[in-house]
Image (spheres, rainbow, N blue to C red):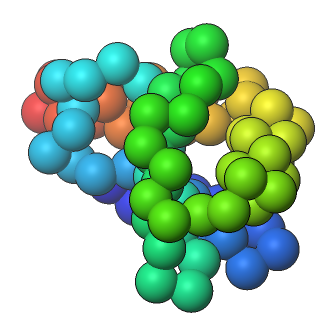
């Protein structure tokens, strides 16, 4: 799945292979990668980010939550329906 958001140097995207998992987002910055569940918003894997970075990432996800969930569902639908 595509990269869907770039904010403050963070890149947010979905992996197509993860479509069977609950809604989540991957985030990368400077070679570090984390994973967050989207419903509810919760850290799944910190991936070497510092606590303050994880708080910033979580805030970005909260601020864009509706967009991220809608995008996840739209992409999931594309892959499930064909």
In x, y percent, where is residue 70?
58, 27
Q: Is 50 located above or below residue 51 in the figure?
A: below
Residue 72 appears in the picture as rendered: no
Q: Residue 72, how many percent across, how many down?
A: 46, 33
Nearest the eye: 33 or 49: 49
Give 37 or 76, whichever is nearer the viewer.
37
Is 23 or 72 nearer to us in this picture? Answer: 23
Q: Position of residue 2 (x, y in %)?
A: 40, 60
Spot the residue most to the top: 40
Q: How many marks?
A: 0
- Residue at 53 percent across and 59 percent down: it is 27
Residue 82 sits above or below residue 40 on the image:
below
Could you tell me if residue 82 is visible in this image?
A: yes
- Residue placed furthest toward the bottom: 30
- Which residue is painted at 46% across and 83% down in the image? 31
Q: Residue at x 42, y 24 (%)?
A: 23
Residue 38 in picture, x, y percent from top left: 56, 25
37 left or right of 52 in image? left
Image point 57% across, 14% down: which residue? 39
Quadrant of image for the C terminus? top left
Which quarter shows the N terminus?
bottom left
């Amino acid at each position: 799945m595509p990269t869907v958001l770039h904010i403050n140097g963070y890149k947010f995207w979905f992996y197509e292979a993860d479509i069977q998992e609950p809604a989540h987002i991957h985030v990368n910055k400077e070679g570090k990668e984390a994973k967050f569940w989207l419903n509810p918003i919760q850290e799944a894997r910190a991936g070497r980010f510092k606590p303050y970075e994880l708080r910033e990432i979580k805030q970005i996800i909260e601020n864009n939550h509706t967009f991220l969930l809608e995008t996840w569902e739209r992409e999931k639908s594309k892959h499930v329906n064909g």
